[in-house]
Image (cartoon, grey):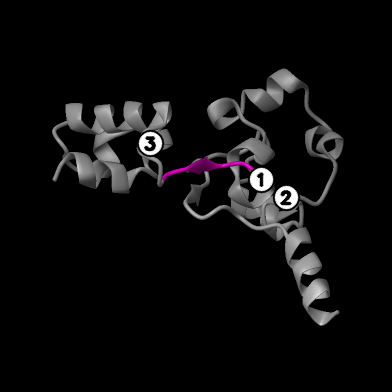
Amino acid sequence: EALILAVAVRSCQRFVTPGCSDYLKWKDPDGDTCISYVKKGVCRDGELLVTEQDLRRGCSVGECKDALYGKFANEACCECGGGHNTNDCQTPEALNCTKEYIDSGCGDLNKAVSDACQGYTKCFQKACA
């Protein structure tokens, strides 16, 4: 019985996918970041702790979508169920970012690629080795 209970509890737990990275420098129209959302108790362990309606309360879809990278927290932040997988170097985003880095001459990462590409250092290292 204890084993069945342990399996049931484990299957209900949410978690952040390994390799998930927040969209760096993402923030909502109020200036809140992914870290702010966790600290305020809006998100934890890969899920929203509020309804999507509450998440979007106080701003029009256009206004919220106009936040950095045009994403809501549940699309931009790993702890909220979003983010992106920076371990997969074959996604269209990873390929575009790697091309951007190679085109820059594989130089200083902070100067070479846009903020949206900052999480793909593993892909850059493979490409520029």
The answer to whether the residues at label 3 and label 1 have Cβ atoms under 8 Å apart is no
**Picture coordinates of residue 111 (x, y %)?**
25, 38
Q: Position of residue 41 (x, y in %)?
A: 76, 57
**Kind of residue at disc 2:** Glu
Does residue 25 sit above or below 44 in this rendering? above
Q: Are marks 3 and 2 in contact (CB under 8 Å)?
A: no
Foreground tag (3 vs 1) = 1
Provide the residue designation for mark 2: 47
Task: Tell me which amino acid carries mark 1.
Answer: Gly
Residue beneath disc 1:
81
Task: Please give the name of the residue rendered at 42% of the width and 44% of the height, measured from the top-left corner.
Answer: 86
Mark 1–mark 2 distance (CA, rounded to whole Å): 5 Å
**Mark 3 vs mark 1, CA separation in Å:** 19 Å
Dominant SS of magenta comes to: loop
- Which callout, 3 or 1, points at the residue further toward the start of the chain? 1
Q: Is residue 50 magenta?
A: no
Q: Quadrant of residue 61?
A: top right
Q: Which residues are magenta?
A: 82-86
Q: Which residue is mark 3?
A: 117
Per the image, label 1 sits on a secondary structure element best described as: loop
Q: Secondary structure at mark 3?
A: helix
Nearer to us in this view, 11 or 123 = 11
Residue 25 visible from this viewpoint: no
The kind of residue on which mark 3 rests is Cys
Marks 1 and 2 close (CB-CB < 8 Å): yes
Q: Is residue 33 left or right of residue 56?
A: left
Does residue 128 appear in the picture of this structure?
yes
Residue in front for this viewpoint, 90 or 117: 90
CA gap between label 3 and label 2 equals: 24 Å
Residue 114 vs residue 21, the one in the foreground: 21
Specify few, some or many for label 1: CA neighbours under 10 Å numbering under 14, 14-19, or 20 or more: many
